Image: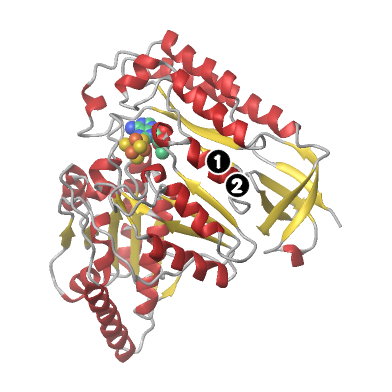
Amino acid sequence: MSYKRQEIPQSEISRQLEICARVRERLAAAGRPMLALVDTYGCQQNESDSEVLRGYLREMGCGFTDDEFQADIIVVNTCAVREHAEMRILGNVGALNHAKKAKPDQIIALCGCMVQQEHMAERVKRSYPIVNLVFGPHELWRFPELLERSMTGKKRVFETRQSDGAVSEGMPRARDGALKGWLSVMYGCNNFCTYCVVPYVRGRERSRRPEDIVREARSLVENGCKDITLLGQNVNSYGRDLGLGVDFADLIRMINDIPGEFLIRFMTSHPKDATEKLFKTMAECKKCARQLHLPVQAGNDRVLRAMNRGYTAAQYIEKAELARRYMPDLVLTTDIIAGFPGETDGEFADTLELVRRVRYDAMFTFIYSPRVGTPAAALPDPMPRQDKQKNFDRLLELSNAISQEKHNEYVGRTLRVLVDGENSDRQYPLTSRTNGGRLVHLRGGRELIGQFTDVKIEKAATWALFGEAAE
Ligand code: 5AD
Ligand code: SF4
């Protein structure tokens, strides 16, 4: 691969911060505080990017609102992974017409994966004249510059050039509460699974330096974070591009060594790159959660090959069993696509069989959605939508039944959870997560929020457990 690491110089980030200060002064002189609304779709990486958007906006002196009629700046951070998400986003952007009419100076910006696709940027240009600014994931670090340009100039700003992507450090971040934190360890993807648009919109794999990651993890912990999720499209190839001899397992160990009581989670792991060293490290590191999201996508070897996944069903099962040998209490989750082009009912039955064999704690299931420019979108796809839906429904039913059975096994046990918030449920007013990441609705006092506590599980449903804080 010809990609060379590209790091954005600190002087460039400083320049962005100077622009923020300039915008802030101008707004202060105009005597009105600005309000911004950041609307986020898609994956955790997008949530993390939105923290940067809000960080920059805060530097510009903006406050935040949920009300599109109050907002002076609206930023929609978009997702491209399935058509359903794109249609929802376009519908919601169209509905901003009313707010824009009432507030003609309002700036509407679209960023993220959806608009990084050329055909989508064109569509927005043509059919959504209320949108003032469009930029892709590669331009995130220079959002202030682009926003200032669209505020002061008359022309709409479109910045979605093709790029392999870069690594930028030192951007401001407005985090959503202190208790849980996202921490990107790498960006992009080199795998080119044939159904997936991500490698086209997020560029090549590139890792942040270990010292930058550890510094950020330490600062999170010092600020009260008790649950850190390391993010990357494929965390198991962390470090390959750096050539420092530090892999993902080493990184987990470095973060585990930071003093304090906190948990380390991560996603997403590609099965072909998940190693015994990783499982061993997870098992040895006290702070590493017993949780592994290991997307299998399909259980039939022909389909897996057509998806370019790089493993067979048997190899996958072997890895999952190896992980469980190291961590018998491991919570294992997965992603599965039903209705990949050309997948037959017989091949889909292999997926159901694999699911019965592996018995996931929870599964995220999707119906295949053709993505422009991906190899799978060019394959013959004879199965009617209703038949795909039927397969999907069977998968969901199986997945729910297994989750329920697994959850039933928790009843009567006492577990350690991190209490993370409140709930509208009168009987169980608190929410919490187990070490393995399962949701527990909890009876207990508000003072527990932000604390690790023991809970006795008394009831189980498909997606959640219920219990009482143990004294
Ligand atoms: N259609 C349906 N599901 C998809 N995913 C990725 N691309 C597609 C697509 N074109 C699913 C995969 C992936 C998850 C994040 O989204 O299962 O793991
Ligand atoms: Fe997409 Fe495959 Fe990369 Fe995941 S690993 S982002 S499914 S190309």
Residue 27 in percent (x, y) is at: 31, 85
Determine if the C-beta at disc 2 is less than 8 A from ligand 2.
Answer: no
Is 315 or 298 nearer to us in this picture? 315
Residue sticking out furthest to the top: 346
Q: Which residue is disc 1 drawn over?
A: 280
Is 440 or 11 nearer to us in this picture? 11
Q: What is the quadrant of the C terminus in the image?
A: bottom right
Give left or right: position of 50 versus 228: left
Q: CA distance from mark 2 to mark 1?
A: 6 Å
Tell me which residue sits at (44%, 15%) in the image: 348
Tell me, yes or no, whether the two marked residues, 2 and 1, touch with CB atoms within 8 Å.
Answer: yes
- Vertical arrangement, residue 343 with respect to residue 414, above or below: above
Residue 224's mark? none
Secondary-structure class at tag 2: helix
Q: Which residue is disc 2 drawn over?
A: 284
Circle 2 packing at 10 Å, graded few (<14), some (14-19), many (20+), is: some
Q: Is residue 54 visible?
A: yes
Residue 272 in percent (x, y) is at: 39, 31
Report the image quarter containing ligand 2.
Answer: top left
Tell me which residue sits at (61%, 31%) in the image: 325
Q: Amino acid at mark 1?
A: Lys
Q: What is the quadrant of the N terminus in the image?
A: top left
Q: Amino acid at mark 2?
A: Glu
Is 228 or 135 nearer to us in this picture? 228
Give left or right: position of 196 versus 361: left
Give left or right: position of 416 versus 352: right
Residue 164 in percent (x, y) is at: 20, 50
